[in-house]
Image (tube, rainbow, N blue to C red):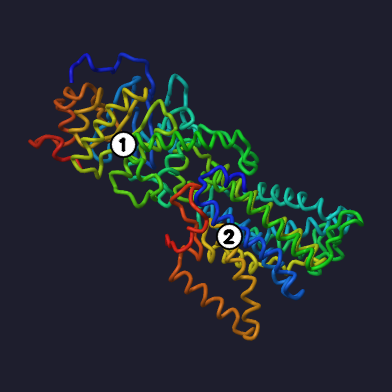
Amino acid sequence: MEQSLASDKKSWIKPQLIFIAVIIAGFVAYPFVVSDYFIDVAFYFGIYALLGLSLNIVLGEVGLFDLGHAGFYAVGAYTTAILNTKYGVPILVLIPVSAIVAALFAYILFSPVIHLQGDYLLIVTLGLGEIVRLALINNPFNLTGGPDGVFGIDFPRIGEFFVCDTSLKFYFLIWIIVALTIAALLCLQNSRIGRAWNYIREDEVAANAMGIDSRRYKLLAFVLGAAIAAVAGNVYACKLMVVSPESFTFMESCLMFCIVLIGGMGSIPGVLLGAAFISLFPEIFRPFANYRMLFFGLAMMLMMMFRPGGVWPRKRGAVGFKSLLDDTGRNDG
Amino acid sequence: MADNDRKHASGEIVLETRQLTKIFGGLTAVGAVDLKVHKGEILSLIGPNGAGKTTVFNVVTGIYKPEEGQVLFGGRDITGRAPHRIVECGIARTFQNIRLFPDMTCLENVMAGRHCRSRAGLFSSIFKTPGQRAEEKSIREIAERRLEQVGLAGSRDELAKNIAYGSQRMLEIARALASEPDLLVLDEPSSGLNPKETEDLMVFLKNLIHEDDVTILLIEHDMNLVMGISDWVVVLDGGRKIAEGAPEDVYADPLVIEAYLGKDDEDTPYELSA
């Protein structure tokens, strides 16, 4: 990341680097000043950030509606749970394995339906997400444990030398993964692949006519999105030490969808804000637990009315030449 | 325009359609059209509304698959290839209703044209390999040059939807040019332009032929433009080719006048154009 920044103009580097440094310092210092409970809140913030980033590729960058993203999250979590409890494969090894399994899963499932447009695709993804959940409940081949799920998942460990067994360690595990994902996605955004995704979102016919194989790039988005969601599933599974189908309901897919919409489609800082909102919201409104969803619905409606482009939309206007800081205060609707 | 300026029938054939037929439901939108575009010429496809001009373009650029007939490009059969493959072969197009990427910058729009000429994959893009960076740099440089060529260098960081209509037309041409096409296919490039802009476009296209080693196939309603820049004109009506020839000959052809005006009308064709 730093290298790519340094290769661009010098004048804007400093404020942006300082901004990033302050945020990183904040994240490192945070768990040492708050209680374990709030470290866990931040952990779930990280999980939702990762899920939001994964859906953002599909929904934000390419503009494909996907309301079944929890399915990939589930595939990652169950792959981890099953291979770890039944075959004793270490959790850290299972991070890439889960990602690859979910990616293959997405590739096979979406290959036949990728040509569908807009709401048709949305219905199909909704169906796929539910099929995954129902399949897990029905305990195929005695692998998924039915409604009870799979329990007894190990901690991430490197032999006896390092065991990730406290809230603090999990906090760092998830946020290191989020940071690496963000770095990779930022590079992708400013590459021909990221642009191809955006061209498809803006006008698919024109994108095709400019030489972009839209089918291939849409599939790539789903595969990559699924892989990242599966990594989130992996970390989630070993944090809870148990996975069960009720963690991967339609509501989870909806929350991911909201994260991207709240933040601003295709905007990485926006996704982080959206994830913060979704994961901190229940904490803030804990005193009014009964009215939580009411407030949530109201907030979403107000958002759509007054800031349809999201809180922090991605600003175009300079291909990698202007600072992320300039991104605020613009509403492209 | 002197006769010896004409390039038609002199150079090699860039694009050829043989008995091209496209049927929608029961309607023959394009019926058995033969078209020959020679290297370095400007060929205009004209005809009344609904004559099948845009359909011919859509078949040539792969958006529709023809029921019958062939499209040959540089001698190769490209019939029925997907649009993105056809761009790779060297045919780039613009659209009748401008189709830019509205929420992206002008520069990014033009960079789209470089997609088929670049290769960076997922991993080289994530890890920013030296090869990928060099490629990105060249993509940006070529796109900037094309923007400059159409006179939009100053708008490089503006969103495509925010620039003037006439500029959007030029931006679309720049985007097509960025893919370094051998054949540029323009669907009504002057529609919506004022007389001054149309004049500029005419000069631009004429220069383009000389500067860029490109061949141009265009659909046009503006008869001044057609007469002014075409080396060859093909007239379609009801999906069939009814005439072709040098602009003045076609202009005087009774069949063409009839197609535009019906039999007993006295107006000249271009006053009906819209």
Q: Work out which quarter of the rendered image holds the C terminus of chain B and state it.
A: top left
Question: Which of A267 and B245 lies nearest the eye of the viewer?
Answer: A267
**Local secondary structure at mark 2:** helix
Q: Mark 2 lies on which chain?
A: A
User: Residue sitting at 67 percent across and 56 percent down?
Assistant: A179
Residue A47 higher or lower than B134, as above or below: below
Please state if B178 lies on the left or on the right of A84 as rendered. Answer: left
Q: Quadrant of residue B266?
A: top left
Residue B188's spot in the image, x, y percent? Answer: 28, 38
> Label 2 belongs to which residue?
A19
Which amino acid does the dot numbered 1 rest on?
A: Gly
Amino acid on which the number 2 mark rests in the picture: Phe
Indicate the quadrant where residue B173 lies: top left
Q: In this view, does A161 lie to the left or right of B189?
A: right
Observer able to see residue A120: no
**Percent position (x, y) of residue A261?**
53, 64
Q: In the rendered structure, find residue B52 and report the number of the disc placed on it.
A: 1
Q: Do the dots labelled 1 and 2 sit on one chain? A: no
Q: What element carries label 1?
A: loop
Q: Residue at x 34, y 15 (%)?
A: B11
How many other residues sit within 10 Å of disc 2, few (<14), some (14-19) or many (≥20)? some
- Say which of B166 and B256 sits in front: B166
Please identify the residue farthest to the right as the structure is shown: A160
Chain letter of the residue carrying label 1: B
What residue sits 31% from the left and 13% below the top? B10
Above or below A12: residue A277: below
Asked if residue A284 shows in the view, the reply is yes
- Residue A46: image quadrant is bottom right
Circle 1 residues within 10 Å: few <14, some 14–19, many ≥20 = many
Instruction: Provide residue B84's location: percent of width, then percent of height.
Output: 49, 36
Q: Which of marks 1 and 2 is in front?
A: 2
